[in-house]
Image (spheres, grey):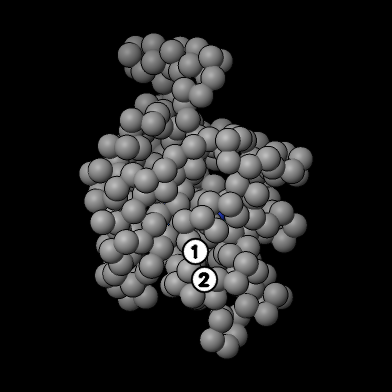
Amino acid sequence: MDPQKITSETVRADFNDLSAVVHYTRAAHELGLWASERALIERFFPDKSASLLEAGCGAGRVTLGLWSLGYHHLTAFDFAEELVDQARSLAAERGADAGPTAIAFHHADATVLSTVSAFADRQFAGALFMFNGLMQIPGHAHRRAALRELHRACAPGAPLLFTTHDRDSSPTERALWRLETIRWTRGEQDPRLVDFGDRYFEDEAGRTFMHLPNREEILADLAATGWTHEFDAMRTKIAQESRDVLNFSDECRFWVARKA
Ligand SMILES: C[S@@+](CC[C@H](N)C(=O)[O-])C[C@H]1O[C@@H](n2cnc3c(N)ncnc32)[C@H](O)[C@@H]1O
C-alpha cells in the first residue's frame, strides 16, 4: 500500500483520538437510538431473544439502545479500543454488564473477524453496522471483506442493517462530485484517498474518513458477498428525527439485506 494512503490504521487512530471519543461517548450517553433506527430495528429484528451482532459499536450508542429495548443477547465490537472501553463503562453504568443479559464487548476488526473465536460461523441471528461505520473502512475490497465476514458469522435468514451517505443525493452533491471526477481523471485528487467517492475531512468529531457510494455500488457489493437486498430508503422517509439527532448526523440511506 502506498504509504501516503489512508489505511484502517489511520481510521482506527482517528477514532481513538480524544475528540472522537468525546463526541461518540456523549452521543452514547445523551442521544441513544434515532427514531429511524428504532423503527427499522423493530421492523426487521422482531425477535428480542435473538442473538445479535453489532459491528462498529463505538461508545455503545446503538448497543445500549438495543439493550434498553429488550434485546438481551448482544455481542458488540469495534476496532477502536478507547471507544470499546467507553461502551463497556456505559454498560456497567446501566447494569448491562453482568448476569445472563450482559452485553459481550470485543475489540476486533470487521474485515478479519474470524481471528476472534467469539465470531464463529453462523453464530448470530442478525447483524448491524450503524451510522456509516461500514463506509469508514478504506478500500473497496476491505468493505467487501467486512460484508463477507458478517455474512459468515450470521445464520441463514439473518438480516443485516447498515447505513451509507449517498454521493448523488442532491444537485449540489452531484455538482461537487462532477468536479471530483475531473480531479480523479487528471490525477489531481487528494493523494491520501483510496477510491473515487472517498472523503477525508475534519470537524467537531475529529478527522473522519468516509466513502460515499452510489446505490448501484452497494447493490453490487451485497450481491458479491452473499447478501440479498431487502430494503433501502433515505432516513427522512423513515422517521422524523429530533433536532439533537439532526445536529449529530446528516441524512443517510438505510439498507437491510438478508442472508439466504
Ligand atoms: C461513525 S462511528 C459509529 C459508532 C456507533 N455505532 C454510533 O452509532 O455512535 C463508526 C464506528 O465504526 C468503527 N469501525 C470502523 N471501521 C471498523 C472496522 N474495520 N472494524 C471495527 N470497527 C470499525 C469505528 O471505530 C467507529 O466506532
x, y percent for residue 214: 40, 29
- Residue 236, quarter of picture: top right
Q: Which mark is residue 46?
A: 1
x, y percent for residue 185: 33, 14
Q: Which amino acid, mark 2? A: Lys
Pointer 1 local density, CA inside 10 Å: few below 14, some 14–19, many at least 20: few
Quarter of the figure with the C terminus: bottom left
> Is label 1 in a helix, a strand or a loop?
loop
Q: Which amino acid, mark 1? A: Pro
x, y percent for residue 95: 67, 80
Is 173 positioned to the left or the right of 157 in the image?
right
65 is higher (above) or lower (below) than 243 = below
Q: Which mark is residue 48?
A: 2
Q: Which residue occupies the foreground of this view, 76 or 170? A: 170
Q: Residue at x 39, y 57 (%)?
A: 159
> Is label 2 in a helix, a strand or a loop?
loop
41 is higher (above) or lower (below) than 164 = below
x, y percent for residue 25: 67, 58
Is 93 positioned to the left or the right of 102 in the image?
right
Q: Which residue occupies the foreground of this view, 92 or 251? A: 251
Q: What is the CA distance from the residue labelled 2 to the residue labelled 1?
A: 6 Å
Labels 2 & 1 near each other (Cβ < 8 A): yes
Visible in this render: residue 93?
yes
Q: Residue at x 63, y 59 (%)?
A: 61
Q: Residue at x 30, y 73 (%)?
A: 120
Visible in this render: residue 204?
no
Confirm or reject: label 2 Cβ below 8 Å from ligand 1.
Answer: no
